[in-house]
Image: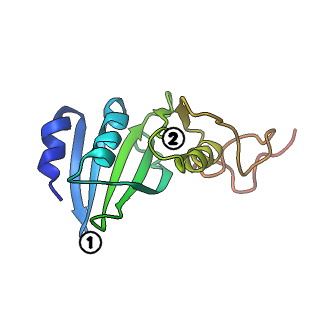
Amino acid sequence: MNVDLIMDNFGGGITGVTTAHDEITVAATRDILIPLLRFLKEREEFAFDFLTDLCGVDYLPALPRFRVVYHLYSLKYKHRLRVKVAVEESDPVVDSCVSLWAGADWHERECFDLFGIMFKDHPNLQRILLPTDFVGHPLRKDFPLEGFKAP
């Protein structure tokens, strides 16, 4: 996979590229996220036509606190790529990629529900696993293990 092509097109928005266990991870800024994902999906050299997963990660106490991680797969070339985007706790918003992969709908809703990360322009961003009146986001590291106590 030609990572240099990614760097040539998005160099200013790429904050790092790492390889571990023969898997490549590209860290990007959220302002280039959708153009980068579209590029990775539509360019013949990559053909990442399948979003296998999208998840949130809480790195408390690190700053920025959250990451949204996109796991991409190319059915044509049988290769994988991970894209990570850092998200500040004070502004936990990332653009939705539902327009690229319809299956992202449920993944983004789950990330919103469990981490409180919002996805701009998502068609139906609401809780998916927890009741609508549930308080908090249980996969955040500072969420109480016993849950919140009623006063």
The residue sitting at 29% across, 47% down in the picture is 40
Q: Are there few (<14), some (14-19), or many (20+) residues within 10 Å of tag 2?
A: some
The residue sitting at 69% across, 56% down in the picture is 145
Q: Nearer the viewer, residue 139 or 3?
A: 3
Report which residue position mark 2 lands on: 98
Of the 4 image quadrants, the one containing the C terminus is: top right
Q: Is residue 135 above or below residue 54?
A: above
Of the 4 image quadrants, the one containing the N terminus is: bottom left
Residue 51: mark in rendering: none
| For residue 118, side relative to residue 12 (left or right) | right
Q: Amino acid at mark 2?
A: Val
Label 1 element class: loop
Report which residue position mark 1 lands on: 21
Give the total number of marks visible in the rendering.
Answer: 2
| For residue 115, side relative to residue 31 (left or right) | right
Q: Earlier in the sequence, mark 1 or mark 2?
A: 1
The residue sitting at 61% across, 33% down in the picture is 123
Q: Nearer the viewer, residue 135 or 108?
A: 108
The residue sitting at 82% across, 46% down in the picture is 149
Q: Residue furthest bottom?
A: 21
Q: Nearer the viewer, residue 67 or 36?
A: 36
Instruction: Indicate the quadrant where residue 21 lies.
Output: bottom left
| For residue 78, side relative to residue 94 (left or right) | left
Q: Are there few (<14), some (14-19), or many (20+) residues within 10 Å of tag 1?
A: few
Residue 63 seen: no
Q: What percent of the width, then of the height, locates residue 8?
A: 12, 39
Label 2 element class: loop
Query: In front of the other: label 1 or label 2?
Result: 2
Q: What percent of the width, then of the height, locates residue 108?
A: 56, 44
